[in-house]
Image (tube, helix red, strand yellow):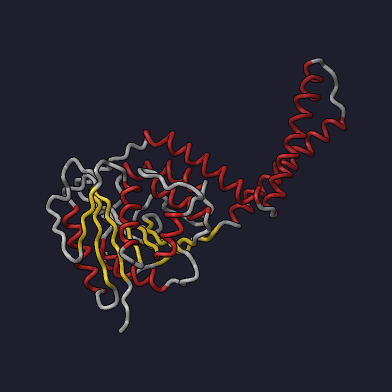
Amino acid sequence: MEIKPKVAIIIPCYKARDSINSVVENCLIYLDKIKENFKYKIFIIDDACPQKSCRNIKENIFVKLLHNKKNLGVGASTIKGIKYAMKKKFDIFIKLDADGQHPPKYLVDLIPFIERLPKFQLFLTKGTRYKIRISKNKVPFSRKIGTLFLDPIARSALNYRGLSDVTNGFLGMDSNTAKLLIYSKRSDIEPRYLFESSLLAKCSELEIGLNEFYMIPYYGVNWNSSMNALSMVFPLFYFWLKTTFRRIFRKYLISFNLGTLLLLITIFSSSISSILFFNKILPEIKNDIFVTAGTSSAFTSSGVLAIISLALFFFYDYASAIKVKTVFFEAINND
């Protein structure tokens, strides 16, 4: 008898009173379409919601409700759900939001896609809202503005090439990837709003492959984000600084490669140029002393070398990053 892979659908729930029931119902409708090949269960994590959003959720063989005693955040709730499902020996983990912006119809393609991925490689598969032009259910203007400024900052800190949607929380992975992400001590996964970005940062550190699938999100008429973009500026800047330093340190200082050489040349050349300018050229200019041709030439040469080596370093850093693979699911044709 063939053993069916077990799929855990993880749904953190906080202030989703108007949407959580329909999200669960739609998940069950689309999961039923693949029941011949997969076993499944939905794990809803009630993150101490003040609205009591989960009060009408009925537990059964397909739905399990978990409760946080206090509000822990979307990241911590997701990790809790995955850990619980791990103990129950589930094979595939899908996380989607309770506000309805992640259409469950993509599960029909996403789950078999993850199951078909090579078992000897580690992958995270996530949605992207920005690789396809859509005419309906457009991303709200407030979300676009936040993403316009915040996404590029987070993206620049990650070792991925072609990543288009850092903050999308519709994602899936197999058990091997989940175990490494959750239990590896490399870096922490943020418990709240920076959950998705920190998860990608950890994937980047662990050199986990990344797939992005086209998706059209659904934002209802009354949809409203609880995240204030302005309040995220400092946390995101700190995240960018920390993640970039860790990435540069691990990629170019622990190991030696062409990027390391270019970085050392940049540092050495810029140091020579700075020393010449502040210790030689600037004092001579202030004292109306003619700057010699040799000093001027050394300053110019070292400065130009620093600029060229830095440009080559950025090119190498980009070219050596992990290439994100884009996936097109059949479900998107139904929009």
Q: Residue at x 13, y 58 (%)?
A: 58
Of residue 15 and residue 328, the one placed in the foreground of this image is 15
* Residue 143 higher or lower than 210, as above or below: above
* Residue 324 higher or lower than 1, as above or below: above
Q: Residue at x 38, y 67 (%)?
A: 328
**In the rendered view, does 184 fall on the left or right side of 86?**
right
**In the rendered view, does 80 fall on the left or right side of 265?**
left
Quadrant for the C terminus, please.
Answer: bottom left
Q: How many numbered discs, if any?
A: 0
Quadrant for the N terminus, please.
Answer: bottom left
Q: Is residue 30 visible?
A: yes
- Which quarter of the figure has residue 127? bottom left
Residue 211 rendering spot, x and y as whole percentages: 44, 62
**In the rendered view, does 33 fall on the left or right side of 283?**
left
Of residue 23 and residue 3, the one placed in the foreground of this image is 3
Q: Residue at x 19, y 53 (%)?
A: 20
Of residue 61 and residue 313, the one placed in the foreground of this image is 61
Residue at the limit of the structure toward the front, as seen here = 87
Residue 135 rendering spot, x and y as whole percentages: 29, 57
**In the rendered view, does 185 fall on the left or right side of 1?**
right
